[in-house]
Image (spheres, grey):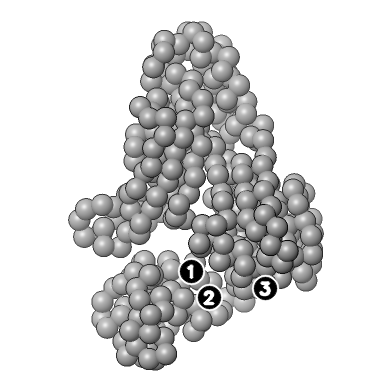
C-alpha cells in the first residue's frame, strides 16, 4: 500500500464473459463510481494480464486484473439551501437549469456549493444512490462553466432507466456554442477520438496518432451553424458520444474554439479591425469578463420518462451572460464584411 492506495488482484470468472471491463469493476467495487473507475483505467491504474487496457475491453474470463484503488473516503455531503431553477419535477426525477460556475458534485477543491448539495436540501432522503454516495441522483454531468439542463434521479429505477438512455443515446442533449471564426460548413460531423492529453493531465485532446492514441476513445460531435456574426459563429452541437470536454475539444480541433474557453484556446482577443471604437472594444471585453467561462449552454434535453414512458422534452433560453454576447455581436455584425474571421 502506498499513500493510502491499495492494489487488488482479481481473476475474472467465466460468468463475466463478454462483459465490459469498466462495468465488471463497477459491479465489483460499488463503493466507487463508474466514472472514477473509468478514469483509473484510462490513467493506467488497471492492468489486464499485465497490460494497460481500455474501459470498453470485453472480458473473456480467466484474465488476471490488477487495480490500484485510491483510499475510499466517507462522504461528507451536506444539504445547502442554494437556489435552483427547477424546470420539471415529479416523484421520480427533476430537471434543473444549472448555472455557469456551479460544480455538479463534490470533488477535490469543490467540497460544497455543488448541485448535489443544493438538491439534497431541496429533496432530502429522496435521491438515487446508484451513482455512488458522493453523487446521489447524478445521471450525467455538465462542466462547471457550462450552463444548462441536467436531469437528477430520485429513485434507483429512474436512475437505471435514465442512465441506459444516456448510454444508448436515446436521451437527446443539444448545446449552443459561440465559437471563434467562420466555419466553412453549414453542417459537419467531427469524428475524432479523444483521450487524456499526453503532457497535460488536466486537459483532453484529439489523439489520432502515436502511442497515446491507444488510450483514446471514439468521439463524434455533430455541428450545425445557427447564426454567423463575422468573427464569431453560433453553433448547435449534438453529442453522439459522451466524452469529457467533447464539444470544447472538437471545436478547438477544427480551428473554432468556444469563446471564453480558458483551456482550449477560446481566450482570443477580438481583432482590432472588427471593433472600430474603443467603447465597443471595452464593451466586448467586459461582456467576456462577465461570462467567466466558455460560451456553451445545454439548451435542450429530451428523454423517455422512466415510469410512464412518455417522451419529455425541455428547452431553455441562453443564460443572460451568453445572450448579452450574442446580442452585442448582432448589433455590430452588420458593419463587418461578409465572411470575415
Residue behind mark 2: 32
- Reply above or below: 213 against 268: below
Instruction: Give the left or right position of residue 68, taking residue 121 as reference.
Output: left
What residue sits 56% from the left and 66% below the top?
164
Q: Determine whether label 3 and label 2 are within 8 Å by CB.
A: no
| Nearer-the-camera pick, 220 or 22 | 220
- N-terminal of the pair, mark 3 or mark 1, is 1
Label 1 sits on residue: 36
Q: Which mark is residue 156?
A: 3
Q: Secondary structure at mark 1?
A: helix
Q: Are marks 1 and 2 in contact (CB under 8 Å)?
A: yes
Cα distance, mark 3 to mark 1?
20 Å
Quadrant where the image shows the N terminus: bottom left
How many other residues sit within 10 Å of disc 1, few (<14), some (14-19) or many (≥20)? some
Q: Is 112 left or right of 281, judged from the image as shown?
A: right
Instruction: Classify mark 3: residues with Cα within 10 Å, few (<14), some (14-19) or many (20+).
Output: some
| Residue 32 sits above or below residue 265 on the image | below
Q: Is residue 145 visible?
A: no
Name which residue lies at 40% across and 26% down. 181
Q: Is residue 213 above or below residue 36?
A: above
Amino acid at each position: 500500500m502506498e499513500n493510502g492506495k491499495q492494489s487488488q488482484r482479481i481473476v475474472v470468472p467465466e460468468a463475466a464473459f463478454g462483459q465490459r471491463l469498466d462495468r465488471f469493476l463497477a459491479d465489483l467495487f460499488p463503493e466507487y463510481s463508474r466514472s472514477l473507475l473509468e478514469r483509473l483505467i484510462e490513467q493506467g491504474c488497471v492492468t489486464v494480464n499485465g497490460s494497460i487496457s481500455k474501459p470498453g475491453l470485453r472480458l473473456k474470463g480467466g484474465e488476471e486484473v490488477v487495480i490500484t484503488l485510491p483510499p475510499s473516503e466517507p462522504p461528507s455531503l451536506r444539504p445547502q439551501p442554494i437556489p435552483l431553477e427547477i424546470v420539471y419535477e415529479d416523484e421520480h426525477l427533476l430537471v434543473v437549469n444549472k448555472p455557469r460556475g456551479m460544480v455538479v458534485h463534490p470533488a477535490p477543491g469543490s467540497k460544497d456549493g455543488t448541485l448535489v448539495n443544493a438538491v439534497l436540501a431541496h429533496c432530502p432522503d429522496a435521491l438515487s444512490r446508484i451513482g455512488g454516495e458522493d453523487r446521489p441522483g447524478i445521471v450525467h454531468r455538465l462542466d462547471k462553466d457550462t450552463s444548462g439542463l441536467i436531469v437528477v434521479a430520485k429513485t434507483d429505477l429512474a436512475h437505471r432507466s435514465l442512465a441506459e438512455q444516456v448510454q444508448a443515446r436515446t436521451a437527446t442533449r443539444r448545446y449552443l456554442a459561440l465559437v471563434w471564426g467562420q466555419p466553412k460548413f453549414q453542417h459537419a460531423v467531427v469524428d475524432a477520438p479523444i483521450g487524456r492529453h499526453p503532457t497535460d493531465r488536466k486537459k483532453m485532446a484529439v489523439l489520432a496518432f502515436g502511442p497515446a492514441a491507444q488510450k483514446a476513445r471514439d468521439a463524434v460531435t455533430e455541428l450545425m451553424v445557427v447564426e454567423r456574426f463575422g468573427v464569431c459563429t453560433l453553433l448547435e452541437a449534438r453529442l453522439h458520444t459522451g466524452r469529457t470536454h467533447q464539444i470544447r475539444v472538437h471545436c478547438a480541433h477544427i480551428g473554432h474554439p468556444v469563446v471564453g474557453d480558458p483551456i482550449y484556446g477560446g481566450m482570443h482577443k477580438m481583432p482590432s479591425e472588427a471593433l472600430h471604437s474603443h467603447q465597443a472594444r471595452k464593451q466586448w471585453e467586459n461582456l467576456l469578463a462577465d461570462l467567466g467561462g466558455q460560451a456553451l449552454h445545454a439548451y435542450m434535453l429530451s428523454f423517455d420518462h422512466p415510469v410512464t414512458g412518455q417522451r419529455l422534452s425541455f428547452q431553455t433560453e441562453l443564460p443572460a451572460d451568453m445572450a448579452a454576447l450574442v446580442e452585442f455581436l448582432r448589433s455590430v455584425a452588420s458593419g463587418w464584411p461578409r465572411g470575415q474571421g
